[in-house]
Amino acid sequence: MPLRLIGALDEVHISVATATTVATFDVDESVATLVLSHVKSTRDRLALACSSRVWRQAAASEGSWGTCDLVIDGNLSVKITDARFERLLRYCGDVRNLEICGPMPSFGGKCLYKAALATKFQNLETVKFKNCPYVSGLTVACFLRSIGVRDRPKKNRLRCLHLEECNVDPNDLGHFHECLSVDPCKSFHKNNDADDKEISFNLWRCSECMEIIENVEVAMCVVCDDTFCADSCGDDHGYTFCEFCYGFVCHGECENQVTSYLCHGCENASACESCALGGNLTQCLGSLEKPGCSEWFCDGCMEEFVLCDACDCAWCENCWDALPKTISCDECGKCVCGACVEKNFVVCDACDCAWCEDCWTALPKTSSCAKCHKHACKMCVGNSKFNHEQRRCGSCRLAWCDACDVMAYMKLGEFGGCTTIGVILCCTACAKDHPKLQIISGE
C-alpha cells in the first residue's frame, strides 16, 4: 500500500489508499511512545505526530522525544519560526546535536537562550548553523552562555561548532574557541585533508587582511598557526609544502622547522614527514643485503619502481637494474631481488627461463637431476642434453641429466618373473634392493 505524507509541522495528513479499503495507523499511546523513542529524524517524528490523535499526544508531550538530535532542514526549515522551534524544543528531552540549515527570515533564534529551555541542552555536543543569515553571532554567544558551555570541564564542552561567517565579529572568535573541547587549530591540522565536518570550528581570521574566512579558504601555518586567505594573502606569506594534507608553512623561520620530501621521479609531488612515512610516497630502501638509493617516489612515478615479491624490499628502476641476479617469473611476472632468487625461484638450465615456485610446481613434465639438481622446464624436458625422461629410474622415479648419467648413476637391467620378462632402467640404489633384477650393464 502506498504511504504518502503531505505537508509538514502543523498540517500533515497521512493517506493510505487501496482499491476497496482505507487502512488506519492507530495504536495505543504506549506503543506510539515506544516507536517514537527509536525514531531519530525530526521530520519523521513530526509526520507521525500528525497521523492521528494518539500519535500527536505521544509525540507532543513535554520531553517525549527523550535524548535526540534536533535537525531542521529541507521543507522544515522554510516553515520554522521562533515560536514553532520553541514548541519543538519542549518535545525534546536532552538535545545532543543541534543543526539548523536555511531557515526563513522569520527564524532569528531568540528562543534559544530562554532560561526555561536551558535544561534541554545540558549535554549538547555539536551546534551547526548553515545558511542562517538572520541568526547573529551575538544570539549564538548568548545561547551558549545561557546553557553554561564555558562552565563545563574542558573535555565536556562542544565537540563541533559551525557558524555563518557574515554574522560573526572577528573579535568574538576567541570566545567561541573557549566553548570547544577540541583545540580548533589542532583539529584543523588533523582534518584539513578530510571533510570540513570533521573540523571542530569553521571560521578563522586572516592574519593579513583581518577578514573572516571559512575552512575551505584557509591556509594555516603548521608551525605558528597563523591563518591566511589561501588564494591571496597566503601566497605572499608562505606556500603549501605537502600536497597530500595541504600543509602550509610561512616563509622564513617557520619553513626552517619543517621537513618535506620531494618525488625524485617527477620532482613535483612533495609531502610532509607524516604523509611521506604514512605511505603517500615510497622510498627506495633496497634490502638488508644491499641498501637502495633512499630517494622518494610518488604514486605517479611508481611505474619506475620495483617491489620484490618475496621479501617486499623496494627499489627504484635504476637500483633494480644494477642488482645482480634480479629475475622475474616467465609465467606470472612475479619479481624477486638477487638475494631471493635461489630461495624462491627455479631456473631452467637449458633455456634459462625462470619460474617462481608456485608456477614451477604447476608445470607439467618439469624435471630436476637427482645429483646436480639442474632443472629442465616443460619445453626442455626432451632436450638431448637434459633429456631426463630417458634417464629416469623405473623404480624410484628419480631422474638424472646426461652428465651425471655418464658417471653410472643409471643401470640397465632385466627384470625376470614367473610369467614376465622385461627390460627397465634402474639406478644403482634400487638395483641392490631388488634381488630379481639382473644387472646387464652399469658401473
Image (cartoon, rainbow, N blue to C red):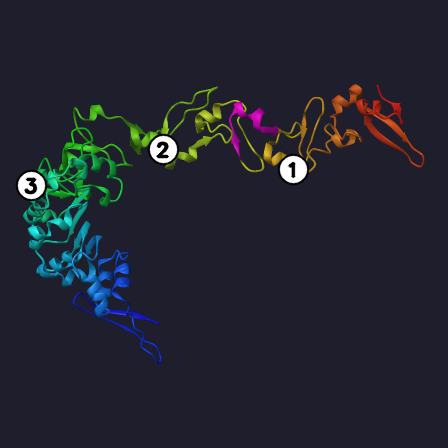
Residue that carries the numbered disc 3 in the rendered image: 172
Residue drawn at x 31%, y 32% as measured from the top left = 275
Q: In this view, does 131 lie to the left or right of 30?
A: left
Label 2 neighbour load within 10 Å: few <14, some 14-19, many 20+: few
Q: Nearer the viewer, residue 8 or 427?
A: 8
Amino acid type of the residue that numbered disc 1 sits on in the rendered structure: Leu
- Magenta-drawn stretch contains 293: no
Q: How far apart are marks 3 and 2 (CA)?
A: 40 Å
Q: Distance between the residues labelled 1 and 3?
A: 75 Å
Give the mark nearer the N terminus: 2 vs 1.
2
Label 1 neighbour load within 10 Å: few <14, some 14-19, many 20+: few
- Magenta-drawn stretch contains 337: yes
| Residue reaching furthest to the right | 418
Are circles 1 and 3 on residues that touch, CB within 8 Å? no
Amino acid type of the residue that numbered disc 2 sits on in the rendered structure: Gly
Q: In this view, does 29 lie to the left or right of 323?
A: left
Horizontal and vertical percent position of residue 114: 7, 52
Q: What is the number of the mark on residue 363?
A: 1
Horizontal and vertical percent position of residue 201: 17, 42
Q: Is residue 399 left or right of residue 292?
A: right
SS category of the residue bearing label 2: helix
